[in-house]
Amino acid sequence: MWARLLRFSPKVRCVFAASTITIAEAFTITKTITGTVTNTITVNEIEDYEKYKTTCEWRPVQDNYLMDFDQSFLLTSIAEHQGVTKKDLIEEIGRRQDVLHWMRERNIRSYKDVAAIIAEYYARPKHIYKKMLAGEEVKAVAASRDS
């Protein structure tokens, strides 16, 4: 089973639940003058049949997300399989968030540029992260074959 319809509020237009990663995402689709905007409302872990844990929730007044990774059973499972602590995983999520913000601040939007930076981060995470924090230029060494 790849997807199934879940019951949510009428504002939710579409829900996708991937059973292989046990996450459900509820989002709205809003038509605007400039185009279509998709906004994720919640991200839920599916622990068991009819048993969901909300790990991320959009707060519309503040226009930000409240993330609660402490209650995440998926992160606990991933940590056990990776042989690291849950705290280490949460710190890595924070570093990856920093990388995304760094790209946004520099208006890096081309999928090739984004992919090259992500490939660099995966290849040499500590080195690339230090360069980003120092404000240095990050050159893609692990670039794609067709670049």
Image (cartoon, helix red, strand yellow):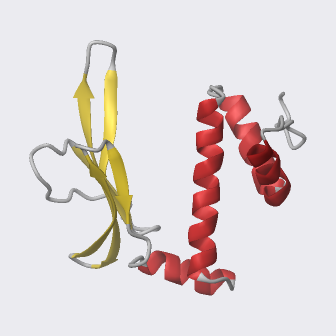
Question: Residue furthest toward the right?
Answer: 141
Residue lying farthest to the front in this orientation: 134
Q: Is residue 11 above or below residue 72?
A: above
Assign the N terminus to one quadrant of the image. bottom left
Residue 133 to residue 18: above or below: above
Please indicate whether residue 77 sits to the left or right of residue 45 in the image. Answer: right
Screen quadrant of the C terminus: top right
In the picture, measured across the screen, residue 23 lies left or right of residue 86, that is left
Residue at screen point 14% across, 59% down: 7
Toward which corner of the image does residue 125 lie, by quadrant? bottom right
How many numbered marks does the figure carry?
0
Residue 8 percent coordinates (x, y):
14, 56
Residue 62 is left or right of residue 107, and the answer is left
> In the visual, does 27 lie left or right of 146?
left
Q: Position of residue 3 (x, y in %)?
A: 33, 57
Q: Residue at x 76, y 55 (%)?
A: 122
Q: Residue at left 76%, top 52%?
A: 129
Up/down of 30 relative to 117, above or below: above
| Nearer to me, 101 or 121 | 101
* Residue in view at x 71 percent, y 39 percent: 115
In which quarter of the view is residue 14 placed?
A: top left
Image coords of residue 49 (percent x, y) = 25, 78
Most extreme residue toward the left, as rendered? 10
Q: Position of residue 126 (x, y in %)?
A: 81, 59
